[in-house]
Image: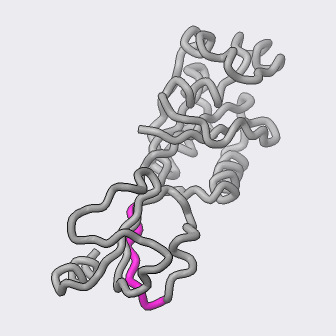
Amino acid sequence: AKDTSALLVRGEKVAFFSDEDSNYLPSGYVKLTKNNEDFKGLVYITNKKNHPKVDDLPKDIKALKLIKKSIVLGVGCRKNYSSEKMLNYVKKGLDEYNIDISAVRLITTVEVKSNEEAILNLSNTYGWPIKTWALDEIRRVQDKFIGSDFVEKTLGIRAVCEPTVDLCGAKIIVDKIACDGMTLCIGEGE
């Protein structure tokens, strides 16, 4: 931030882009394009771990990455699920889909899992709050998603991770991933 501020004060060109709104350009910045290699700094807003627009830039460009906390993780799991496995699967899922772990703003699940050790450990490890939903709330939206007979027999609902992301108002960007006794869905939104 200090380097970017100094560049702007000196009147140097600083490029800008945002994954969310490609037309937005703050005052004093130039739009990042493939042809404007003469900028000295870059400010970009993303929730990606690595960004192709930045990876190919010359190493002397001062880049400031602002991470938008827009990711919602829907999580379901069997009773007494391994905390270590959950941490590993969530990290692996975020890495696989190139999502910066700092972009996660919320974990969401069904209310009956509010005291599940693995989910609480995930929340405590990263400081992510947990939003839970009642069974009746999930039943209202569960038909939009492919459910499970096992989950229905156990909880009385057909799915957890995707409906809870949907109830948070997030757009699902990664459908349900089944991971050895747990499910993970990744959504994006305010």
Magenta segment? 59-67
Which residue is found at the position 48% from the left and 28% from the top?
169
Residue 98 drawn at (x, y percent): 62, 59
Q: In the displayed structure, does residue 45 sit left or right of residue 186? A: left
Residue 67: in sight, yes or no?
A: no
Seen at 28% across and 71% down, the residue is 29
The image quadrant that residue 122 belongs to is top right
Front residue of 109/168: it is: 168
- Residue at 55 percent across and 35 percent down: it is 171
Residue located farthest toward the left when viewing the structure as drawn: 9
- Scheme by which the image is coloured: one colour
Residue 103 in view in this figure? yes
Q: Is residue 136 left or right of residue 148?
A: left
Residue at screen point 58% across, 28% down: 109
Q: Is residue 65 above or below residue 157?
A: below
Q: Quadrant of the C terminus?
A: top left
Most common SS among magenta residues: strand
The residue closer to the viewer here, 174 or 88, is 174
Q: Quadrant of residue 81?
A: top right
- Is residue 86 placed above or below 133 in the rendered structure? below
Percent from the top left, x then y, of residue 36?
Answer: 42, 80
Question: Is residue 143 depicted above or below 26 in this figure?
Answer: above
Is 70 situated left or right of 109 in this image?
A: left
Q: Is residue 61 magenta?
A: yes
Residue 124 coordinates in the image, percent (x, y): 49, 46
